[in-house]
Amino acid sequence: DSGVTQTPKHLITATGQRVTLRCSPRSGDLSVYWYQQSLDQGLQFLIQYYNGEERAKGNILERFSAQQFPDLHSELNLSSLELGDSALYFCASSPYDPGELFFGEGSRLTVL
Amino acid sequence: DAKTTQPPSMDCAEGRAANLPCNHSTISGNEYVYWYRQIHSQGPQYIIHGLKNNETNEMASLIITEDRKSSTLILPHATLRDTAVYYCIVRVSGGYQKVTFGTGTKLQVIP
């Protein structure tokens, strides 16, 4: 158990819909990272937050947005969903920069 | 961040040492080498990291060449549970950065 909690674990929705994925980092970790992993693909970096502020941005689609709240949990919002958005979405937290990333077990999104 | 190159796949006999190479020829002086692994579709797991010196922990050893252009992750006695995709990444200290993972090496431990 990494200490990083992601909810929901599984989510099935339809094209055009909007979903929110939630991440609770390890206690005390200020950095949160989001990754997308499509079937048999590598981990694609989406975005990083540090203590509520955006730190780095990857190739995150405009339909996607994220934020980190004062209690340090983070949410990834995916809207106007397309079939190609079906993937595992991982959240990771880190105690310092650079530091080891501790990953959650992921949220598996299926768009039908 | 410097780019890394890893072989796409490797096999290792159970009980033998698994040596996973990583090339990071453009690494700069303040970049650390990190190794992670991902077992099936689980969340990736941190293994070890280093800057210049060789490092060892309960999971593995990390050997970094003197010129720091390459490194090797060593699993001393591979077990079937070590079958996974292993990622080598480099990260600079401080600043704003994307933490990117490549395609890694798929290690198959064979009975």
Image: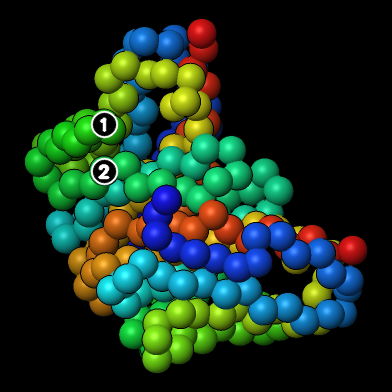
Seen in the picture, residue B13 relative to A36 is either above or below; the reply is above
Residue drawn at the location 89% of the way across and 63% of the way down? A112
Q: Which residue is mark 2?
A: B48
- CA–CA distance in space, label 1 to label 2: 7 Å
Q: Nearer the viewer, residue B31 or B14?
A: B14
- Secondary structure, mark 2, is strand
Residue A94 lies, in percent from the top left, at 32, 66
Q: Which residue is mark 1?
A: B60
Q: Nearer the viewer, residue B46 or A1?
A: A1
Q: Quadrant of residue A64?
A: bottom right
Residue A102 appears in the rendering:
yes
Residue B28 lies, in percent from the top left, at 21, 57
What crowding class fits label 2: few (fewer than 14 Cα within 10 Å), some (14-19), or many (20 or more)? many
Q: Quadrant of residue B55?
A: top left
Seen in the picture, residue B84 relative to A79 is either above or below; the reply is above
- Secondary structure, mark 1, is loop
